[in-house]
Amino acid sequence: MATHKLLLLPGDGIGPEVMREVEKIVGWFRKRGVGFETETDLVGGSAYDAHGVAISEDAMSRAQAADAVLFGAVGGAKWDSVPYAVRPEAGLLRLRKDLGLFANLRPAICYPALADASSLKREVVEGLDIMIVRELTGGVYFGEPKEIVTLEDGSQRAVDTQIYHTHEVERIARVAFDLAGKRRNKVSSAEKFNVMKTGVFWRQVVTRIHKQEFSGVELEHVLADNCAMQLVRYPKQFDVIVTDNLFGDILSDIAAMLTGSLGMLPSASLGAEDPASGQRKALYEPVHGSAPDIAGKGLANPIAMIGSFGMALRYSFGLLDEADRLDRAIANVLASGTRTKDIAGPGMNAVGTQDVGDAIVKEL
Ligand code: ATP
Ligand code: MG
């Protein structure tokens, strides 16, 4: 039996509460013969309290050795004044950097049962299923120079620099085409080639990779601003959207609000493929944060975290039937009206975090 090594990093706030529900699901699959091996470690404020750092070297080497990392959430008022280098968020940044996670995948799925919770009309979003692939390690967030300079006349000038290299665009394009091939076979590549050299370059590289390696997938180029407009006008036209770090940050937040609650949104961050094993380093986490306002109360919606585990089933372990089964269980639980407060409709009784986890296990 193949074993799949998972490192669980629950973190702070509601992180441990939602991770506990994932452990129930892992346990269910394990009982049915799927070989999961799990380890748990500290990250964020809880790691700082124990070790004085946001993630220990020991946890880092476990993350390197794991097939996938499941990450909860970090941070909270308790650590607001810890030194910058060891603040809770530094744990996630270190993981991203050391694991080389360059592709951020954010699905926006609108479950029929929740279509009325969207900021758009039911008919615009019902059945929505799009995947935003955001480049995560390059672009204007990291390019040098990055500075505020005081000029001779006393005025100032601020500079950020957008840089992309061939290999960076190639590898993110490959991730997008590869995903589309397993979905509805369409990639929309978003940039601003009309005003940016990096946009011209992005379009050239994506076009070449498409022609050379993925000509069976439909490719369209779309201006990032138009893409934003189309997302709130007719989002179902999209399958996979691939874009740079900055545009991806914005477009994925727009897509998120099409689907209802923050408590519903999973994400994956993927690294380079190991040529020997074909495996990628990967980290899966809910889009939401540690939600200090509801932490410890058993109110958190665990579906974003459970959905993140579902993405691990699909993208790290190739367990497609299991991933489909988990998705159906989530959809059925939502349809049955078992919902936490953030997604309970008017007049509906809200249940707690554990109730949702238990209901999903029962539905499985
Ligand atoms: P961060 O800086 O870590 O992203 P944040 O304050 O921006 O934190 P969250 O911690 O995600 O964002 O919280 C934003 C709001 O959404 C809060 O009111 C929180 O209670 C709510 N929220 C976040 N996650 C969930 C969840 N899983 N279930 C229910 N409500 C949630
Ligand atoms: Mg936030």
Image (cartoon, rainbow, N blue to C red):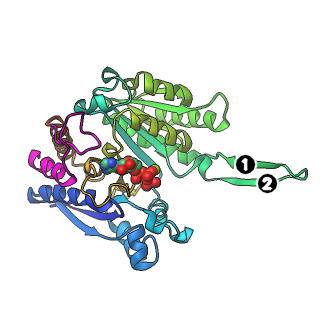
Q: Amino acid at mark 2?
A: Val
Label 1 sits on residue? 159
Determine crowd level at label 1: few under 14, some 14-19, many 20+ residues with C-alpha closer than 10 A. Answer: few
Residue 199 % position (x, y): 61, 35
Any magenta on residue 336?
no
Residue 306 % position (x, y): 25, 50
Cα–Cα gap, marks 2 and 1: 8 Å
Residue closest to the eye, 63 or 73: 73
Q: Secondary structure at mark 2?
A: strand
Residue closest to the eye, 341 or 173: 341
Q: Which residues are magenta?
A: 337-364
Quadrant in the picture for residue 9: bottom left
Indicate left or right for 109 with 74 as reference: left
Residue closest to the eye, 184 or 250: 250
Question: Image point 32% across, 71% down: which residue?
Answer: 41
Question: Image point 26% across, 47% down: which residue?
Answer: 303
Numbered mark located on residue 149 in the image: 2
Mark closer to the chain start, 2 or 1: 2
Numbered mark located on residue 143 in the image: none
- Classify 228 as above or below 277: above
Q: Are marks 2 and 1 in contact (CB under 8 Å)?
A: yes
Please say whether residue 287 is visible from this viewpoint: no
Q: Secondary structure at mark 1?
A: strand
Prevailing secondary structure class for the magenta stretch in the rendered image: loop
Any magenta on residue 352?
yes
Indicate left or right for 351 with 279 as reference: left
